[in-house]
Amino acid sequence: MTRRIERLTPDLLQLLGEHGTPCRSCVRWELDPVRRGRLSSGAEAADEKDAWLSHVLREWGSCGRVAMVDDVAVGYVVYAPPAFVPGADSHPTAPVSADAVLMTMAYVHPDHARGGLGRMLVQHMARDLVKRGGIRAVEAFVDPRGRRACLPPGDFLAHVGFRTHRWHPTTPRMRMDLRSALTWRDEVEAALEKLRGVVRPTPVPAPIRMDEAPEP
């Protein structure tokens, strides 16, 4: 079984839809409530999703990562600056902080949950945002119980470095400081390197040949 993380593209968005993930036709974030109310079908919502992704890719760049297992899309994370996410303004804990981007969704298929893919997605997102520069944090409106579609589960985000930034009984806003994410990654890498040093076999000196032995 091979696992890898890919950038979100229109083709991968289509692939996510084929495997039944809630991302394909959810436009909770991409459209404001008025525009969402005008949609009459899931197909129209999917078209709006395609148009949104193309717009963000053109104007801002990569805005998501997809977890692949043996060429099957099984999870994803989507993020963008608040200016590209008009649906966020209707949440009770809005607005997003000026120094942060908004992570709109994080999802891993139940068959692949608890295998580290969610953490991998968040790490790749953090690495991308740090490289861009000028972004200090990632924020997300979450579902504390993890039962509502198109809202990231709060318990999962708490396990990968997010903390409650503004409390609300149904839609709190959580935040992850990118410097903390980098520090955590560095600590993990250092611990792995230390472990490699512990388990590295002790070099055994080559035997001395009799014709090379030093004279007494």
Image (cartoon, rainbow, N blue to C red):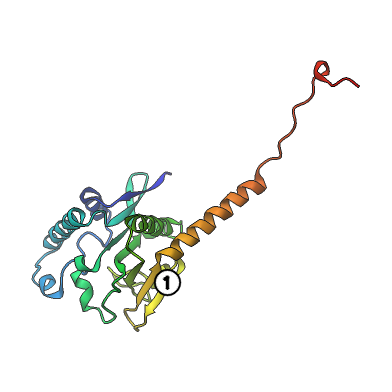
38 in relation to 55, above or below: below
Secondary structure beneath label 1: helix
- Residue in the image at 42% along x and 74% along y: 163
Residue 70: % across, % down: 37, 44
- On screen, residue 7 versus residue 157, left or right, reads left
Whole-percent x and y of residue 96? 28, 74
Residue closest to the far top: 211
Please state the horizontal and vertical placement of residue 18, each as a whole percent of the image: 24, 52
Q: Quick one: which residue is furthest to the right in this view?
A: 216
Residue 134 occupies quadrant: bottom left
Q: Residues within 10 Å of mark 1 (few under 14, many from 20)?
A: some
Q: How many marks?
A: 1
Please determine whether, in this image, residue 161 is positioned above or below residue 74: below
Query: Going by the picture, which residue comes out furthest to the bottom?
Result: 169
Q: Is residue 27 visible?
A: no
Q: Which amino acid does label 1 sit on?
A: Asp
Q: In which quarter of the image is the C terminus?
A: top right
Image coordinates for residue 179, horizontal then vertical, percent = 43, 64
**Residue closer to the observer: 206 or 16:** 206
Residue 162, picture quadrant: bottom left
Residue under circle 1? 155
Q: Quadrant of the N terminus?
A: top left
Depth order, front residue of 208/77: 208
> Residue 36 appears in which quarter of the rendering?
bottom left
Q: Is residue 14 left or right of residue 47?
A: right
| Residue 108 in view (yes/no) | yes
